[in-house]
Structures are given as structure tokens and as C-alpha cells.
Image (cartoon, grey):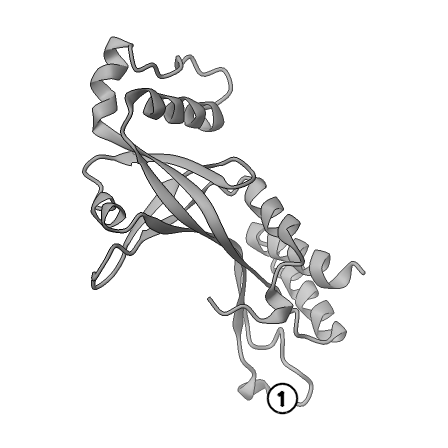
């Protein structure tokens, strides 16, 4: 991923806040060894706010083979993305027909060591934590237990993953290389278009470039 200096996070707190703000769905990418293409799996996950990510996937998932070949993976999250028409960021000395459109977005890529979890009690703990995070408040679902007869029959159908984060690359691409007058124009256009995604992108742009 290309990260220009003006798109780089201001520090770890920025990308941590981005993930902590409800971003709990991403793509797990496993390259394995000597493969033509990696296996890419969309998935919910739990991040502990520091170095550990946990999740589970179905046992027939094709991701297990590349992870067993090479227990390394990337978990990537992309959000707050919008298309910016060419006129929005056009410098005054560039003709409208020569202006260049772009996209604005935020992304975090976590490079991880991988541990596959097959122990029933550990899998039950992962499922219980995910249910606590994702199930609606007041759900009657009991905690998953390896010694419960129903759960004991279901647990072999999944495998768990514990990912230990070893490197982070993050990018907040919100016109950081533009002059103030163009930044204000982009902010106005995001406000005028007014979709929920525009509002989130506008928050990033203001926070990073206009609130000083």
C-alpha cells in the first residue's frame, strides 16, 4: 500500500481509534507458499485494542491450508470511503477537462502471526466473546461451553484463529496535500452531497486538516 506522508496516521492513537470505533469487519488475507493468488476471507473479528485479534471460521473454509503452509496473514479494514469528482480538488491553474478525480478513504492493515485454535474450550471462549460483542442486548443465548451437549456437537464444525499483530500500516487519504482553499471546497462539496459516508469522510478531513 502506498502511503504518502500527508496520508500517514499522526500516530498510533489515530489508527487505534479508527479500529475501536466499531470497525470489526475486514478481510483476512492468507498467502500460503508458492500460490498463484492468496485466499481472502471476509470476516468479523475481535480486537483487544492492542496486539491480539480473535475470530472463528468454518472448518471447510479454504483459508486453513495456506495458513498451515505459512502462519502469517494480513487483516485489512477499509471504511469511510467516498468518490471525489474531479472538480472538487481541481487547482485553479488546471483546466476543468484536465482535472483528476480521486477517492478518499481510511484503511488499517494488520500484519499478524497466526495460531490456529482447535482446542474445544478455546474455541468456546472465542465464540462466547464474539456473541457478547455482536449479539443484541438482552439475547438469551447462553455462553458457549465445550462440555454442553449441543455445543460439543457444533464446535468441530469451526476452527478458531488467534492473530498476534507484528506490524501496522494505516492510511487516512483525505486531501492532505491540498491547499486550504481547496480543502474548504472539498468540505463544502461533501456537506452538499450529504450521504452518511460523506459525513464520515468530512469528519476525517476536518479533524486532520481544518481544525488547527
Q: Mark 1 points at which residue?
A: 94
Question: Residue 172 or 98: which is nearer the viewer?
Answer: 172
Residue 141 percent coordinates (x, y) = 39, 15
Q: Which residue is drawn at 54% across and 87% down?
A: 97
Q: In this view, does 100 lie above or below 26?
A: below
Residue 198 lies, in percent from the top left, at 59, 56
Q: Residue furthest right?
A: 212
Tell me which corner region of the image, top left, top right, bottom left or bottom right, holds residue 44: top left
Between 112 and 144, the one lying in front of the other is 112
Residue sitting at x 60%, y 60%: 193
In the image, residue 160 sits, relative to residue 206, either above or below, namely above
- Secondary structure of the residue carrying tag 1 is loop
20 lies left or right of 164 = right
Q: Can residue 47 be seen in this view?
A: yes
Quick one: quadrant of the C terminus?
bottom right
> Quarter of the image holding residue 135?
top left
Q: In the rendering, at what x and y percent does residue 157 appear?
A: 21, 28
Residue at horizontal 47 percent and vertical 46 percent from the top: 165
With 144 as the anchor, is 208 left or right in this view? right
Amino acid at each position: 500500500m502506498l502511503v504518502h506522508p500527508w496520508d500517514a496516521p499522526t500516530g498510533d492513537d489515530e489508527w487505534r481509534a479508527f479500529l475501536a470505533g466499531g470497525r470489526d469487519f475486514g478481510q483476512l488475507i492468507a498467502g500460503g507458499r508458492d500460490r498463484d493468488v492468496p485466499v481472502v476471507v471476509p470476516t468479523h473479528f475481535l480486537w483487544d485494542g492492542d496486539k491480539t485479534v480473535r475470530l472463528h471460521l468454518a472448518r471447510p473454509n479454504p483459508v486453513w491450508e495456506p495458513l498451515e503452509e505459512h502462519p502469517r496473514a494480513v487483516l485489512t479494514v477499509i471504511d469511510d470511503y467516498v468518490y471525489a469528482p474531479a472538480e472538487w480538488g481541481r487547482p485553479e491553474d488546471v483546466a476543468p477537462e484536465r482535472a483528476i478525480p480521486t477517492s478518499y478513504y481510511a484503511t488499517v492493515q494488520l500484519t499478524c502471526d497466526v495460531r490456529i485454535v482447535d482446542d474445544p474450550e478455546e474455541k468456546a471462549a472465542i465464540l462466547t466473546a464474539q456473541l457478547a460483542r455482536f449479539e443484541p442486548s438482552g439475547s438469551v443465548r447462553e455462553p458457549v461451553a465445550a462440555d454442553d451437549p449441543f455445543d460439543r456437537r457444533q464446535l468441530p464444525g469451526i476452527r478458531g484463529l488467534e492473530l498476534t499483530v507484528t506490524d501496522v500500516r494505516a492510511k487516512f487519504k483525505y486531501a492532505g496535500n491540498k491547499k486550504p482553499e481547496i480543502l474548504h471546497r472539498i468540505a463544502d462539496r461533501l456537506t452538499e452531497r450529504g450521504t452518511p459516508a460523506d459525513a464520515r469522510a468530512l469528519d476525517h478531513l476536518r479533524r486532520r486538516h481544518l481544525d488547527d
